[in-house]
Amino acid sequence: MFTGIIEQTGTLVGVKDTGGAQRITVEAPGLATRLHEGDSLGVSGVCLTALDVNPTYFYADLAQETLDRTSLGSLAPGARVNLELPTAAGSPLGGHIVQGHVDGTGVLASLESVVPVSSPHFDKETTDWTLKVRVPDHVRKWMVQKGSVAIEGISLTIADFDGECIRVAILPLTYWRTNLHTLLPGAPVNIEADVLVKLAYADMHAAKKPAFDLTEPWLVANGY
């Protein structure tokens, strides 16, 4: 389990087809030294298993499900990815519960500074940013204003949802510490809805199901 607090970014340096899966190579000095073969980690919001770890690099295999559901398969060498190690039991939850099970890819619609770049008061190190992401249809039912969402593995709060796009506020630290500052409009981004919202949604719809009709055919079919 993760909490969506990104520890550092890494660089995708290679993608290799191993026949049935793709193996990625990620340069992550600092974090790689804390990994062991078989450890789980979050890579831009996707829970992967570290392979062939050394002090500078780690490798991970992308199954077909991962390629179909996330943006990792579309990344080119040189792309920046967000990295997070699992949260130890009993540790503070700095963000929210993030499983690393991406629900789908959205599209970065815009990422704009609150203070216009043309303004004399603009300071790229201290300005806030507004991120707008177009959410895929099947994920929209879980987008709740003031609720949590993981975008590229980053724990964020939904400021607004217009039925198609979510808007979130990005602090300067988040902007520069994660891969957000490297992304351009149109880029695919991994989205994981808050698991607590998904559970509440499932319970709500289960409660709305019509009561079971006890009929003669059902009784006969079940041996009564």
Image (cartoon, rainbow, N blue to C red):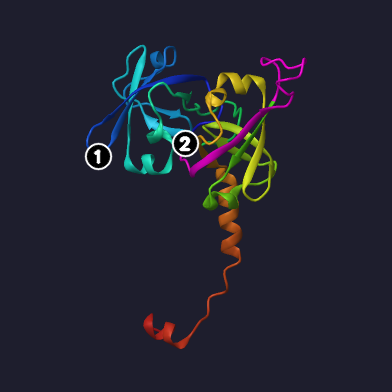
Q: Secondary structure at mark 1?
A: loop
Residue 84 appears in view: no
Q: Which residue is mark 2?
A: 100
Of the residues shown, which amino acid type is indicated by label 2?
A: Gly
The relative height of residue 211 versus residue 77 in the rendered view (above or below) is below
Magenta residue span:
99-128
Q: Horizontal and vertical percent for residue 161?
A: 67, 45
Q: Reply yes or no: does residue 124 show up in magenta.
A: yes
The relative height of residue 52 versus residue 18 in the rendered view (above or below) is above
Counting residues from the start of the chain, the first of labels 2 and 1 encountered is 1
Q: Nearer the viewer, mark 2 or mark 1?
A: 1
Q: Residue at x 74, y 23 (%)?
A: 115
Q: Horizontal and vertical percent for residue 10?
A: 44, 19
Crowdedness near tag 2: few (<14), some (14–19) or many (≥20) residues, C-alpha within 10 Å:
many
Viewer-closest of 128 and 115: 115
Q: Horizontal and vertical percent for residue 222?
A: 38, 80
Viewer-closest of 77 and 11: 77
Q: Reply yes or no: does residue 73 show up in magenta.
A: no
Residue 77 appears in view: yes
Q: Are marks 2 and 1 in contact (CB under 8 Å)?
A: no
Q: Residue furthest left?
A: 19
Of the residues shown, which amino acid type is indicated by label 1?
A: Gly
Q: Residue furthest front?
A: 118
Q: Residue furthest bottom?
A: 216
Can you tell which mark lies on residue 160?
none
Disc 2/disc 1 C-alpha distance (Å)? 22 Å
Q: Secondary structure at mark 2?
A: loop
Can you tell which mark lies on residue 20?
1
Viewer-closest of 211 and 142: 142
Q: Residue at x 73, y 26 (%)?
A: 114
Q: Quadrant of the C terminus?
A: bottom left
Q: Horizontal and vertical percent for residue 93?
A: 59, 29
